[in-house]
Amino acid sequence: MRHSRPQKLGDILRQVSAEIGLDSHLEKGRVIATWEDLMSPPMRTQVVSTRLEKDRLFVQVSSAAWRHELHAQRKEWCERLNNELGRRAVREIVFR
């Protein structure tokens, strides 16, 4: 019987989550949660759904007026989101 050195639980969980493909789902959740934290309360009432596909965040809003306003500020929103995440996780935000 082979004895190995004890490992930290966090290290084991990171390794297992990477092996089963859970990392990408956790990262998507982290990006979307950070986006939701950045939104103002009035903006939250206008967002219908949010999804992340690769490095593009798709945000569906309830009205054309909100979509127009957010679209005009999309680069600033993207920069704020990436700053909060501490890395360039999102290349583009698409408001629909």
Image (cartoon, rainbow, N blue to C red):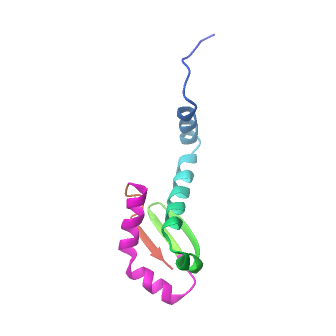
Queried whether the magenta region covers residue 84, the answer comes back as yes
Secondary structure mainly formed by the magenta segment: helix
Place residue 77 in its image quadrant. Answer: bottom left
Which stretch appears magenta? 60-86
Place residue 83 in its image quadrant. Answer: bottom left
Looking at the image, residue 15 lies above or below residue 82? above
In front of the other: 38 or 75: 38
Quadrant location of the N terminus in the rendered image:
top right
Tell me residue 26's x, y (percent). Answer: 56, 51
Q: Identify the residue at horizontal 44%, vertical 86% (top origin).
A: 68
Say how many tags the image has.
0
Tell me residue 71's x, y (percent). Answer: 42, 80
Q: Is residue 79 left or right of residue 26?
A: left
In front of the other: 56 or 46: 46
Looking at the image, residue 23 lies above or below residue 49? above
Task: Determine the residue located farthest toward the front in the rendered image.
Answer: 41
Q: Identify the residue at horizontal 52%, vertical 65% (top origin).
A: 37
Queried whether the magenta region covers residue 42, the answer comes back as no
